[in-house]
Each structure stands twice: as structure tokens, then as C-alpha cells.
Image (cartoon, grey):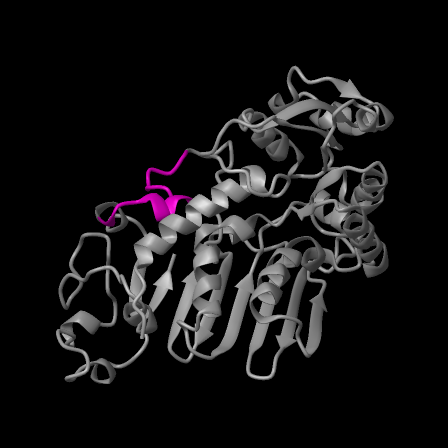
Amino acid sequence: MNVHDRRSFLANTVTAGAAAAAVSWLAPGASAAGPARQRIKLGQIGIGHNHASAKMATFRKLADHFEVVGVVEPSPEWRKRRGDDPAYRGLTWMTEEQLLNTKGLTAVAVETDVCDLVPTAARCIDAGMHLHLDKPGGESLAPFTKLIEEAGRRGLTVQLGYMYRNNPAVQFCQRAVREGWLGQVFEVHAVMSRYQPLAYRQWLGQFRGGSMYIFGCHLIDLVVSMLGKPDRITPFQRQTHSDVRVYDNGLAVLEYPKTTATIRAASLEVDGYQRRQFVVCGDEGTIDIRPLETFRHPSRPTPQAAPHPVESLASRSRKALRKSRFRTRPLRRPTDRTGPDHPGRDRESLSPVARTDGSRSPAGRHRLPTSVEDLRCCEFVV
């Protein structure tokens, strides 16, 4: 059996993810550490998507890679509500026609309100532009399929706004599944919920899929990337609150020959961000990523706790990791892992809770896992 160095893998993962996020989706072969290249000239259509300002802020932050030529928003209402966001400060406001006819324009970020995403993206493809298209990809598969096929015919890239793809913890999990570190995967459990106010749920009511349509797409993307196309999908949609006609609580069960996957998305879970999770269980190990992301409301004080490992897991030293919320829990009884085949492993090192925050558990202090063997007998809570 090959023994892999987990820290080296994580370091490579985060480096690759950062590079991909910055350049590789439009410029194959480009490297953040390589020679200087001509910047990618791009613009943004729409500011109505809830991720729009963050995308623009990111493009402007990565000024060595992107040249932002302008932003388009035909709706006076959206201009009034979000046009003063600092992300757009100093940019040129223009029409869609002006943007698509800008000399040297290479790519467009489509960040309209959700109902306009696919039609706008189709016009950009027709104009010969690479795309960053925010999610979800429409309520009907046919228009989205046509969009992707036309992009492929023209040799254009379409990048969807699934941010978890470059999450180092998710990439770690994907490799563990791909290389069989967890054995036979038999269960996947994914949750992406939050509490939404009345105004948001009223807006959400225009979509047949409700919460599952907006949030569940992120999790479906991860499950399908790991397990492929399911044999059967069974949805369970519920309306909890009567003030708005919307499915505010969704569950989907994806069935595979040897695996079941459950995906949950709700718009009424208090502090739901903290319970957003992606759990993969195999007969030789489990990876539990929770929460999937962190969020700080601008009106709330910044917590004093250290940043979550999802944000910088691969770049931390072993000493720093001991102070994080990264911990392991054995999956097997102590007697399963003792004996001549596992020298040095005893009941103490496989106590019910193994802490890595520098403190001592009832059975003593424990080290971080560093090899496939460690992975096979531990559950990770990231």
C-alpha cells in the first residue's frame, strides 16, 4: 500500500486551486508564478445576482490577471439598490451592446438576476465571449444544454459559479474518494441552508424548486462529480411557512447501486451557515466537512476564534493546525486497530475523542493524521 503525505497533498491542492481560480479557466497553461502575460479583458453584465459584487471585487483584486472594462445593468431598480456598492466604484457603466463590442474583450461575467442568467449568457456566447456564469443554470435543461453545446462548438469556456469546487477541504475529499482512501462509499449527506427573511422568500417563490433550486445545485454538483449520474432521484418538497407560496424546505435522495446520497436545502434554519456540511462515509473512513464556509454579518462583531481551516488548511503548519478546529474521531473500536499489524497503536491513541487543539483528552494528547493509514481509521471534522 502506498503511503501519501497528507500535508504535501493539501499544499499542492490549495496551490492548484488558487491558480485555477485566477487564470486557468480562460488561459490553459497559465501560472500565477509564471512569466507576465497580457491581462484578460472582461466586463460584467448584471448586478442583480447576490454574488455579483463579490465577483467584481475579486476581478479587481486580481488586477494582474484581469482588466475590467465596464459593467452593465439596464434595470434602474438594480442600479438604485446596488449601483453604489464599492465593488463598482470608478467603473464605466455601459450598455450590453457597448460591452460586447468593446475591442479586445475576451470574457464576460454574467451576474444578472437569476431568471435572466441563461438568456444573457446565450447572447454572450453568440458574441464569441468566454463566460463566467453564476448559478443556477436555469429551470429548464434544454436552454442550458443548447448554451453549453454552442460554447463547445465555438471553443468557448463556460465556468459556473460553484465556489466549493476550489475549496481545499472539498478537493481533499474528492481525492480521498477517487483514490479509494475511504473504501466503498455507501453514504453521502449534504446540507446547505440558512434563514431567509420574508422579502427573499417572496423572491424565491418565482422558482418551482424553491430553496433546492437556489442552494441545492451547489451540493448536486459535488455529489455528481464524485459519484456520477444517479440511477434514481426522489424529491421531497415542503412548504413550512404559509405567508409565501414557496418550497422553503427541500430534500432529494440520489440512489446509486451501492450508495445513497441525501441533499437538504432550507430557507428557514436559524444560523444555518454553521451547519452547512458535506459528509462522505465509506466502509474504511469518513470525511465530514462542517461548516462548508464561514460568513460574518457586517452588523455582528468579528469572532475572536482563528479562521476556519477551510480557508487556509493547506497553508498552515502542523503547529498551527493543532490550534484549529480540525479534529479527528476514530471510527472503529480500539480493539480493531491494535495488534502486531499496527505497532504503537493502543487504546490510548484511539480514545473516543482525539483533540488537535493542543489540549489533552481524557486519554492523552494525540497527533494529526499524516498518512492513508491514519485516514482510514479517522473521521475528519473540518
Tell me which segment is drawn in magenta: 302-318
Residue 107 image position (x, y, % from top left):
71, 34
In the picture, measured across the screen, residue 212 lies left or right of residue 142, that is: left
Does any portion of residue 309 appear in the rendered image?
no
Asked whether residue 304 is drawn in magenta, I would say: yes
Q: Nearer the viewer, residue 134 or 228?
A: 228
Residue at point 15%, 66% (across, down):
362
Residue 261 appears in the figure: yes
* Residue 377 location, quadrant: bottom left
Kindly identify the residue that appears in the image at 72 percent across and 51 percent down: 136
Q: Quadrant of residue 74?
A: top right
Q: In this rendering, is residue 302 above or below 8?
A: above
Q: Quadrant of the N terminus?
A: bottom left
The image shows residue 198, relative to residue 192, as above or below, that is: above
Instruction: Tell whether 78 sits left or right of 4.
Output: right
Residue at 72% from the left image edge and 42% from the top image edge: 199
Give the residue drawn at x 54%, y 44%: 20
Along the line of sight, the residue nearer the viewer: 207 or 345: 345
